[in-house]
Amino acid sequence: MTVDPSLLSSYQHPEGTLKDRLAPRTDMRKGILDPHLGIVSGKSVLDIGCNNGYFTIEAMKRGARRAVGVDESNAILGARGLAEEEGVAAEFWQADLDSKEFRRFCPKFDVVFLLSVLTHVHDKDEFLDWLDSRVRYALIFESNHGERNRSHIDLVTKHMHFEGVESLGPSDIPEKPHYLWICRKWNHEQRYTFLQGIEPEFVAIDAIKGWDQMSPEKQAGGYPTTSKRHQELVADIKARGIRQPLILREKDGVLTGFQGVHRFLAAKQLGYKDVPCKIVRGLFFKHLDK
Ligand SMILES: C[S@@+](CC[C@H](N)C(=O)[O-])C[C@H]1O[C@@H](n2cnc3c(N)ncnc32)[C@H](O)[C@@H]1O
């Protein structure tokens, strides 16, 4: 051990100067990095409130393309020391997640870890709204200990937009349980990575061709606009707006809907004039037909 023990917190490191029972808990949570979950391999990863960077460093070891840990405390210095000691190119930023600078300059990441941190955040609603715009594919969320905090997953899903939320169960001793979830976004940006490089723009809803009331039912796995699921989407857009741009194709000056028919129909119903879209043009066009 060459890293100064005063920089190591017992939260993640058994040799940390603050001795408590939390370090072994980190071992219990290693499952979130299991390859079968496919969470980090090839991905960019942000570990918010990373402490000594255990999960940041492990993400790199398990094939993440980039892993960044953020923490306001000096535990981040310990994280840097541990990464250096292990020869792992993880990055660590000492920043306050509530600060204007962090919110302004933090880029998007494929995967975000938010493990036992949410209770520390001052304005959780505002933070989670912001976080939704930073997460591309998945959020690994762990509530802080206690049954009361377990309900924070409801806050997370209220402010963030996911296709699937999977519970991984309790992640600590039964008397003081934390709970873990994997919240996944499924979107075309995951499959067609070139979409990440296209900036959204606002498009007149009436200029979008190819979609009508019957379109959803013609798609594999589609559901009708009369269904409860579609009505919930309308209510969600009414309350919180469109949070993911639609994907359109442009050919010979005609814009055709490719992804987001339910959002399109919901926006029409709500009287939207222009909607945020990513438009696939030219050379990229053929990728969408694969
Ligand atoms: C309970 S620990 C969780 C550490 C790690 N995520 C884990 O689960 O092993 C909470 C961490 O959040 C950090 N933290 C709390 N408030 C923060 C803030 N405003 N900005 C950045 N980090 C913060 C603390 O310094 C601490 O390392």
Image: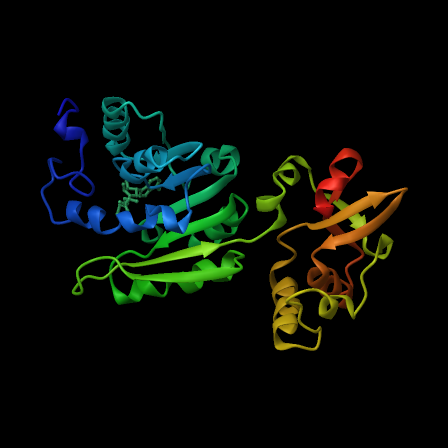
Residue 281, compared with residue 78, is above or below; it is below
- State the residue at coordinates (77%, 59%): 272
- Foreground residue, 167 or 128? 167
- State the residue at coordinates (44%, 32%): 65
- Foreground residue, 232 or 44? 44
102 sits to left or right of 215: left
- State the residue at coordinates (70%, 42%): 200
Residue 122 visible: no
136 sits to left or right of 148: right
The total number of labels drawn is 0
User: Which quadrant of the render holds ligand 1?
Assistant: top left
Provide residue 136's location: percent of width, then percent of height: 53, 45
In the image as oriented, which residue stretches furthest toward the right?
252
- State the residue at coordinates (51%, 35%): 107
- Residue 84 figure quarter: top left
- Residue 63 figure quarter: top left
Provide residue 257's location: percent of width, then percent of height: 77, 54
Provide residue 205's location: percent of width, then percent of height: 81, 55
Provide residue 14's location: percent of width, then percent of height: 12, 39
Residue 117, compared with residue 67, is above or below; it is below
290 sits to left or right of 182: right
Residue 229 visible: yes
